[in-house]
Image (cartoon, rainbow, N blue to C red):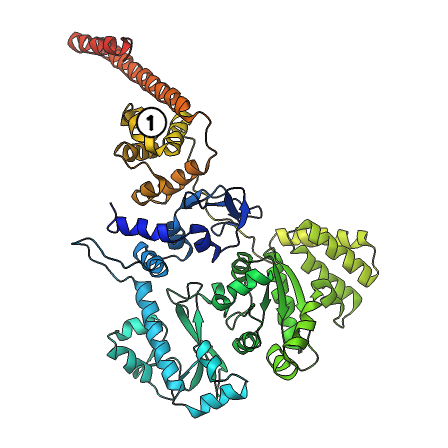
Amino acid sequence: MPAYDNTLEDIKNRLDIVDVISEYISLKKAGQNWKGLCPFHTEKTPSFTVSPAKQIFHCFGCNTGGDIFSFLTRYENLTFPEALNVLAKRAGVELRARPGTVQKTGEKEMMVNIHKDALTFFEHNLTKSDQSQKYFKGRGIDEKNRKLFSLGYAPQSWNALLHYLTKKGYKPEVIKKAGLISQGSKGYYDTFRHRVIFPIYDLKGDVVAFGGRSIDGSDPKYLNSPETPIFNKRKVLYGLYRAKNAIKESGYALFMEGYLDVITAHVFGISNAVAPLGTAFTQEHGKLIKRFVENVVLVFDSDQAGVKAAKKAADILLESGLNVNMLLFPAKEDPDSFLRKHGKEAFQKLLDNPLSIIDFLLKLKADKRVLAREAIETISKVPDKVLQGDYVKMLSEGLKINEVFIIEELKKAEKRLSRGYYTAQTTTGPRSKPGPRPLDEVITLQLLLQLPDKASAYAAKLASEDFMDLLSREIFNKIKEGITYVNELLPHFDESGKAYITELSMRDDIEDAEKALEDCVKKLKDNSKKRMLSEIQTKIRDAEKKKDFVLIKKLQIEQHKLLKPGV
């Protein structure tokens, strides 16, 4: 049994699996359950199902399943103890291991703790730096909002953070692995020096990295943490932890270019703004947002570089299956400057009338043929055929080109795309579905899980050997031991076992379950008897060839016993 068996149930009783999973993906009510797009493989039709009654999830597309602990360990790539700590904290449950159980701090937990302590260091140093406070004040960020966004300052020292963290007990090798110090010919030195600091949070609210902006004109202007065991910039969006609820409530996300754009937007009450971390948008960013909403608005600078970045981002996000609109600013304006000059109301007016991607492209000054080719390449990346049709119509009307010609060119573009000219093909995650299992065994387990209070009594009528499938036999053995409820069973199995159990539990209940279970028990015993008789018959034939009459007699006695009525 797990070391925290009672605690696990306590945590599950206090947390609702729908609430927990809803923080990571968008779920919609579907009868008694909730459904959404699976975060563990690529799909266009929701097959990921969450049962609030049973407190489990199962994806019928990739055959993944389990409870809140299984979800978090898989989604966040955490160890079980790490997931346990996260959920225990959320549930307000104090962890107490069984006597003799040693709790080990995982590498990821250590990394999170280092970043938490580093943040304290940066925040404290901001209060001592007039220059950095003056910088933030000049950007319209007062003391209240500096604290709200946990902004900080890395002092102009080669190793101030290193000294601070080593005094906390961290070894330099571990601090280096966390990306907070680097190593040169003369030893270790701080990664961030004389920069204002922006902490980067993951979806759980843990600081996993930092962004630093120079305030003395030195290069690079922006510096981000390197990738670490807890940070991958392709999979993180700045501000998403704070913005996720507003994104779900508003029905769309605002994608901006940088930290200050996002912070200014939030300061002005526009709380659904996020940004990539000094890198171009990626498919991972698209998938991340799609867990919350289907619609995004790109809010980029109005200069040439901003327009170019917006076009590139739109292509990637459209390919992710998102509906993309664009917001254009007046010349020489960006989200940060526009909000501070004109305020929220003026910004909202722009937001109320965003441009579709086609309208955006049509506004660009370009040769008609060049513009048409660019637009067709963009449309070819849209997986939704209905939306694709709308874009074709808009482009036809905007350029006064017959739709037939656009569709012709679109087919060519899609053909090139499918051959990999413009993007690597998206691959789905590995499918872990097991091979066919004996149907009678599957239905028997389904019925035992459907009738947990009576499962032990029915299981007593069967033997382990009555199950041919090894995983079915394993699950049956646990039920026979008296572990008859789904959430009690799950901790005893690996991912394939959890997936099998949740798949069985998510099936529709069978009518007249007790009668059906009695029939299944009889059939399994009959099948088992037939297998045993067949094996004995084979052994008798082998013994006859060897003329082993003693063995033949012994096998015949066993055969007669099995053939007796009621056996």
Q: Quadrant of residue 126?
A: bottom left
Q: Which residue is mark 1?
A: 468
Q: Residue at x 47, y 81 (%)?
A: 144
Q: Residue at x 37, y 34 (%)?
A: 449
Find residue 134 and report its horizontal and vertical position in percent.
48, 90
**In-front residue for pair 248/201:** 248
Residue 240 drawn above or below residue 222: above
Task: Report the number of discs.
Answer: 1
Q: Outermost residue, bottom direction?
A: 130
**In-front residue for pair 116/182:** 116
Q: Residue at x 63, y 66 (%)?
A: 297
Find residue 31 and report its horizontal and vertical position in percent.
54, 42
Q: Quadrant of residue 392?
A: bottom right
Badge 1 marks a residue whose secondary structure is loop
Find residue 293 and report its horizontal and vertical position in percent.
57, 58
Left or right position of 27 against 560: right
Residue 2 drawn above or below residue 280: above
Could you tell me which quadrant the N terminus lies in?
A: top left
Left or right position of 400 against 11: right
Could you tell me which quadrant the C terminus lies in?
A: top left
Left or right position of 433 against 112: right
At label 1, the amino acid type is Met
Residue 168 drawn above or below residue 11: below
The answer to whether one can see residue 412 in this image is no
**In-front residue for pair 256/158:** 256
Q: Residue at x 72, y 58 (%)?
A: 376
